[in-house]
């Protein structure tokens, strides 16, 4: 009786072996997609890509196995895809590597390892999604002030009252230097209301523009 972690491909590849590996690769892609959608929003195209990527990688590796010419051609094709794609966020690239690893395991015939690996990593992904990490609580505060206002001390008492922490990320001049646009990374205190905080800021900056929004994810690009 074969061990559960033995490869299902013994000798020449048969139709049955290929169908088993491809089916397991699909299952791994579906598992990863459902785990990735937990407490996160996935676009339909990205979800479809995660499901399809594992069997694609599995089939490509089976084709390349032992064929140097095909391997070089596939490497060139993947290079073109890489240079025609934009940089993704760290989480998206991690998910892509996850399904690629599952596809590689299926291509080697280790279908039990592929499923076990996908389940373990997806459980870890769900656990991490439930943790209240700092990025989920961090907000971007943009304040426009007149050039006559000393921004280094103008809002310190309000930050102490309404935020757990704050950091001045950037300062930009506007309107021929008559205005400053400040960008803060802040974390509001529990129980504090953002409306009260913004109202207090408006009294300090002369009722100029103020924006409070979730932290941009562009810094997570790889």
Image (cartoon, helix red, strand yellow):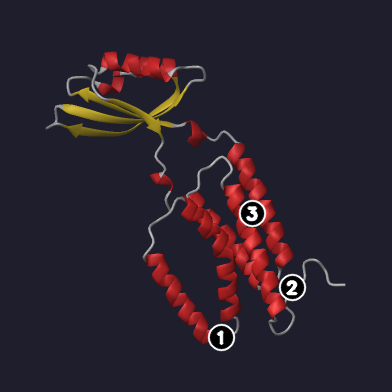
Secondary structure of the residue carrying tag 2 is: loop
Q: Residues within 10 Å of mark 2 (few under 14, many from 20)?
A: some
Gap in Å between the C-alphas at discs 2 and 1? 20 Å
| 91 w.r.t. 79: above or below | above
Residue 117: x and y in percent read 68, 58
Gap in Å between the C-alphas at discs 1 and 3? 31 Å
Seen at 77% across and 67% down, the residue is: 5
| 195 w.r.t. 14: above or below | above
Is residue 13 visible to the viewer in this orientation of the structure?
yes
Q: Nearer the viewer, mark 3 or mark 2?
A: 3
| 4 w.r.t. 32: above or below | below
Q: Which mark is residue 7?
A: 2
Q: Residues within 10 Å of mark 3 (few under 14, many from 20)?
A: some
Left or right: where does residue 210 sit relative to residue 94?
left
Depth check: 45 or 204 in front? 45
Q: Residues within 10 Å of mark 1 (few under 14, many from 20)?
A: few
Residue 185: x and y in percent read 39, 31
Tag 3 residue: 31
Seen at 88% across and 72% down, the residue is: 1
Seen at 55% across and 54% down, the residue is: 95
Secondary structure of the residue carrying tag 1 is: loop
| 14 w.r.t. 160: above or below | below
Seen at 61% across and 46% down, the residue is: 125
Q: Which mark is residue 67?
A: 1
Which mark sits nearer the N-terminus, 2 or 1?
2
Image quadrant occupied by the C terminus: bottom left
Secondary structure of the residue carrying tag 3 is: helix
Disc 1 and disc 3 in contact, CB within 8 angstroms: no
């Amino acid at each position: 009786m074969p061990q559960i972690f033995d490869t299902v491909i013994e000798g020449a590849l048969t139709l049955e072996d290929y169908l088993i590996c491809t089916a397991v690769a699909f299952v791994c892609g579906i598992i990863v997609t459902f785990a990735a959608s937990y407490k996160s929003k996935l676009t339909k195209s990205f979800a479809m890509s995660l499901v399809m990527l594992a069997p694609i990688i599995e089939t490509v590796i089976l084709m390349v196995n032992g064929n140097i010419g095909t391997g070089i051609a596939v490497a060139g094709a993947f290079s073109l895809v890489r240079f025609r794609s934009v940089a993704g966020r760290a989480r998206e690239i991690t998910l892509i590597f996850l399904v690629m690893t599952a596809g590689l395991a299926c291509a080697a015939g280790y279908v039990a390892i592929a499923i076990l690996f996908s389940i373990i990593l997806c459980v870890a992904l769900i656990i991490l999604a439930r943790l209240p990490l700092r990025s989920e609580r961090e907000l971007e505060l943009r304040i426009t002030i007149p050039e006559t206002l000393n921004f280094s001390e103008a809002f310190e008492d309000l930050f102490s009252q309404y935020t757990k922490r704050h950091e001045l990320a950037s300062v930009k001049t506007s309107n021929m230097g008559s205005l400053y646009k400040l960008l803060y990374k802040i974390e509001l205190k529990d129980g504090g209301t953002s409306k009260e905080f913004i109202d207090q800021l408006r009294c300090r900056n002369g009722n100029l523009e103020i924006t409070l929004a979730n932290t941009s994810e562009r810094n997570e690009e790889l």
